[in-house]
Image: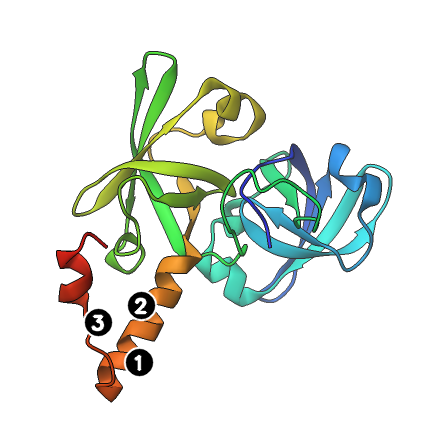
């Protein structure tokens, strides 16, 4: 489990391609102090397993399923990536619950300066957008952010200068592809609600929840 608080920006040193998979070789520094083989590391929000570790880099396998559902296929040598180690049991919970399992990708449609912050509009598919709510949480390339507005085909977030300075988001431009992970709580609520509706054992319906502000 992760929290969406990026610890370090790493650099892709190399990519070894298989038939439908790749092995990423990533340069890092701060996060590697206590990382060992088998540990989970979020790379642009995607949970990967470290397969080798040395003082200044690690490698991770990326399977075909992950490549097809994320923007990792677009990485190349020299690309910068957001890195976060799995959350320790005694750590502060600075962001929100992040699994590192990407729900889909989005495209940056607009970037607008807003005093000391920057507003990003992200377009995405309906199957991802349906879980995104105003003032709720969303993970963009591994960054925990708060949604400021939702439209029929996109959503907006407002990003403070600190976040831009310690992540790769500030390097993105209109048209860039980003990884998206929805708040996991919404997905579990939907699954439980559908199961109960199908069995007709509950009076709690979508209409009931909407009526009372959920």
Q: Quadrant of the C terminus?
A: bottom left
Badge 1 marks a residue whose secondary structure is helix
Q: Earlier in the sequence, mark 1 or mark 3?
A: 1
* Between marks 1 and 3 in the image, the one whose residue lies nearer the viewer: 3
Asked if residue 136 shows in the view, the reply is yes
Residue bearing mark 2:
190
Q: Quadrant of residue 135?
A: top left
Q: Nearer the viewer, residue 3 or 7?
A: 3
Badge 3 marks a residue whose secondary structure is loop
Counting from the top left corner in percent of width and height, residue 20 is at 57, 66
Question: What residue is shown at x 70% (from left), y 55% (from top)?
Answer: 60
Badge 2 marks a residue whose secondary structure is helix
Question: What residue is shown at x 37% (from left), y 63% (from top)?
Answer: 187
Residue bearing mark 1:
195
Counting from the top left corner in percent of width and height, residue 6 is at 59, 36
Residue bearing mark 3:
204
Specify whether 101 is left or right of 199: right
Question: What residue is shown at x 81% (from left), y 54% (from top)?
Answer: 52
Q: Earlier in the sequence, mark 2 or mark 3?
A: 2
Q: Is residue 54 above or below residue 112?
A: below
In the picture, the disc for residue 45 is none
Q: Nearer the viewer, residue 18 or 162?
A: 162
Decide: few, some or many residues near mark 1? Use Cα within 10 Å; few <14, some 14-19, many ≥20: few
* Between marks 2 and 3 in the image, the one whose residue lies nearer the viewer: 3
Q: Earlier in the sequence, mark 2 or mark 1?
A: 2
Asked if residue 176 shows in the view, the reply is no
């Amino acid at each position: 489990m992760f929290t969406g608080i990026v610890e370090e920006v790493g650099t892709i040193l190399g990519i070894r391609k298989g038939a439908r998979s790749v092995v990423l070789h990533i340069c890092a520094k701060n996060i590697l102090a206590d990382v060992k083989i088998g540990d989970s590391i979020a790379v642009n929000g995607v949970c990967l397993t470290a397969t080798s570790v040395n003082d200044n880099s690690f490698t991770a396998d990326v399977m075909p399923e992950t490549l097809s559902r994320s923007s990792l296929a677009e990485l190349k040598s020299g690309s910068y990536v957001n890195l976060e180690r799995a959350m320790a049991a005694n750590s502060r919970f600075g962001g929100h619950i992040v699994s590192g399992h990407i729900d889909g990708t989005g495209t940056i449609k607009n970037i607008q300066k807003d005093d000391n912050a920057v507003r990003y509009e992200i377009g995405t598919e309906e199957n991802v957008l349906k879980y995104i709510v105003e003032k709720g949480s969303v993970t963009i390339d591994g960054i925990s952010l708060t949604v400021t507005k939702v439209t029929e085909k996109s959503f907006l977030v407002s990003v403070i200068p600190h976040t831009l300075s310690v992540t790769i988001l500030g390097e993105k431009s209109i048209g860039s592809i980003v990884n998206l992970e929805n708040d996991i709580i919404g997905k579990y609520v939907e699954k439980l609600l559908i199961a109960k509706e199908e069995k007709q054992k509950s009076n709690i319906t979508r209409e009931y929840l909407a009526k009372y502000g959920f």
